[in-house]
Image (cartoon, rainbow, N blue to C red):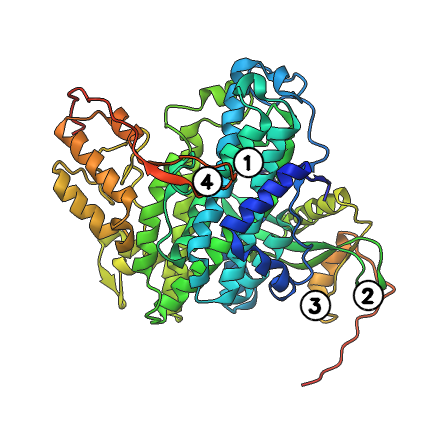
Amino acid sequence: MNVEQTTLPKKYHDAVLHWQRHNFPDYGLLPENWQKYFPNDPEFCLCAKMEVGMGDKVEVGDAKGEKRREKPAELGEEPAKHLIAIIRAQASTEFGSIQQHEGTLARAQDDEDRFWVLRVMAEELRHGYQMLHLLVEQDWSAVSGQKAEEIVEEILSMQTGSHVLDAFNLEYDSFVDNVVFAAVIDRVGKYQLSMQRVCSYKPFAASMPPMLREEAFHLAAGVIPLRRWVQRAAQGNALITTQAIQKAFNKWMPRGLEMFGHEKGGESNIRFGFKNMKNAEAQSLYYEECKRMVADLNQRFIRARLPKLSPEEAEALADRLMKDRGKHEGISHEDLIQLPDKAFFRRKGDAAFTMVGFAGEAFTDVEDYVRHLAAHLPEPYLHSRDMKQYVESLRQVAAGTMTTDQAMKKMPALKRVGGMCPCSRSVRWVMEAVEELPAAHSQS
Amino acid sequence: MSAVAEQIRIRSLTELDVARIVAIDERLTGVYRPDVWEGRIMYYLRRDPDACQVAELNGKVVGFMLSDLRGGEFGLEETSGWVERFGVDPDFQGRSIGRRLFEAVVEHMKRHGATAMRTLVERSDSDLASFLRAVGFEDAPLTALEMRIA
């Protein structure tokens, strides 16, 4: 590949390895098993990779046609502040997903699935490393007000609960989450990386193609096991069901949709030349792509259950089941997977706290809605702090004692409460002191 | 250029192409074998998704070509692009889709340092051999050998 590989200065490289020892203890299994699961593939390299031969001209936005920027100071203050926030968020997601995957990695039923996820984690570590490279190779202090050391320490100290985006603050309940996360949340990552290929800041743009190539494997590490699981489910394997997969989709899809940012936003990303699509446009393409993924999974299920059907007959059966919500040829529509409505279980964006059900139905009674969520989400997730906090906020929004904006901001976060270790465990669940809230309008 | 050729979009392979590749293979061979293709596509995606190309018409994949950049095999030190599998939906054959897929693969291989394209073809498959010759393949000095051991 036409890439230049580089490593971070030793102190930062060592900080990443230190973080890995605390947060990613299974990392060492990868080189030991590489030839078994990835024979003839180039060995994993913990390094930054920059694509060679990216164009020199800005592709979109106000500066379209001008020379791509190579230093933060060339961007201007507002765009530079905006971009460093994007890079920090990107770094946070990379390290955050490793922390999530690690919790349930060992529960995989198949070693092949497990080692695919392990490689995904290692490559996410490399992606996080790549973002740190962008943050330390140039001086961002004029816009961040922080030294490079402080930025790196801040990112490496984040835990599940304190990451920038909500999807990275949810614990996994089982290995089903590892796989559905790769299929659903990594797909958002693919969109972000694809959009950022045009970035007017050249080092960021040049970081994208190598990450995208690796991301293709990450998505496959979600979709291929899902295809195999639905086949097994169709053949009567009681250890994996489409209902379990469905509930995991219901847990992750709303967070995936929110990762694109508010549906009305994204204008400044285009103006600054950082991305080539607004939030709503990218989110809509993503949702359609997820629909296609689910339709493929359903075909895999139907043909495994009814091998005598032709492809056309299997497609017709899926359409019929989805349309009449019935049961035909021994298959119920509930055996198939369906995407939740875009507004289901949302806490950010246009649909935040609007009480829209799985199929798009509107709820007016908050307790009815909570029961509806309980029926559609994985049971272990119902017992989580995240869910408790969401329901408490939802009740307040419905009662008119909290605005939607306040509810969106009022999620618990893990905060560092001391310690100098960059991956410090000295973080605690901290609720921001909530100011006395003025009476607010109801969301109904 | 025909209207169809103009609408065809050539792009890199993704994991969601599995279903259509399985379907094209089923139409070509009469055998439904999703597990085989899931394994192969995983292999290519983890190595280099851009070395594999698919042809899309109105959002539907109608052809694919899976290939890989290698060097050092069989004493061939020069970096080569190997075409392993390809197929075009029978409803869309004869419209230069295979050629366009091949050109996209060759372009990728050249950019990444390949100096030759290589493949293997069954002697009995004259249609395949004539397609490969039409896009520029010639007899190679190597001979494929095999020995049955079971």
Left or right: A439 with respect to A84?
A: left
Q: Give the residue number, with chain letter if any, for mark 4.
A: A188
Q: Nearer the viewer, mark 3 or mark 4?
A: 4
Q: Position of residue A398 (x, y in %)?
A: 15, 31
Label 3 – label 1 distance at C-alpha: 40 Å
Name the amino acid, label 3.
Asp
Q: Give the residue number, with chain letter if any, for mark 3.
A: B125
Where is A436 relative to B82, above or below? above
- Name which of mark 4 and mark 1 comes first in the sequence: 4
Q: Are marks 4 and 2 in contact (CB under 8 Å)?
A: no
Q: Quadrant of the C terminus of chain B?
A: bottom right
Label 1 – label 2 distance at C-alpha: 37 Å
Query: Which is more toward the observer, A54 or A318?
Result: A54
Residue depicted at x 48% and y 32%: A89
Q: Are marks 4 and 2 on the same chain?
A: no
Name the amino acid, label 2.
Phe
Q: Quadrant of residue B138?
A: bottom right
Name the amino acid, label 1.
Ser
Label 4 – label 1 distance at C-alpha: 10 Å
Residue depicted at x 27% and y 40%: A345
Q: Residues within 10 Å of mark 4 (few under 14, many from 20)?
A: many
Q: Give the residue number, with chain letter if any, for mark 2.
A: B74
Label 2 – label 3 distance at C-alpha: 24 Å
Secondary element type, mark 2: helix
Label 4 – label 2 distance at C-alpha: 41 Å
Residue A90 visible, this orientation: no
Name the amino acid, label 4.
Val
Where is B69 relative to B30, above or below? above
Q: Give the residue number, with chain letter if any, for mark 1.
A: A194
Q: Are marks 1 and 2 on the same chain?
A: no
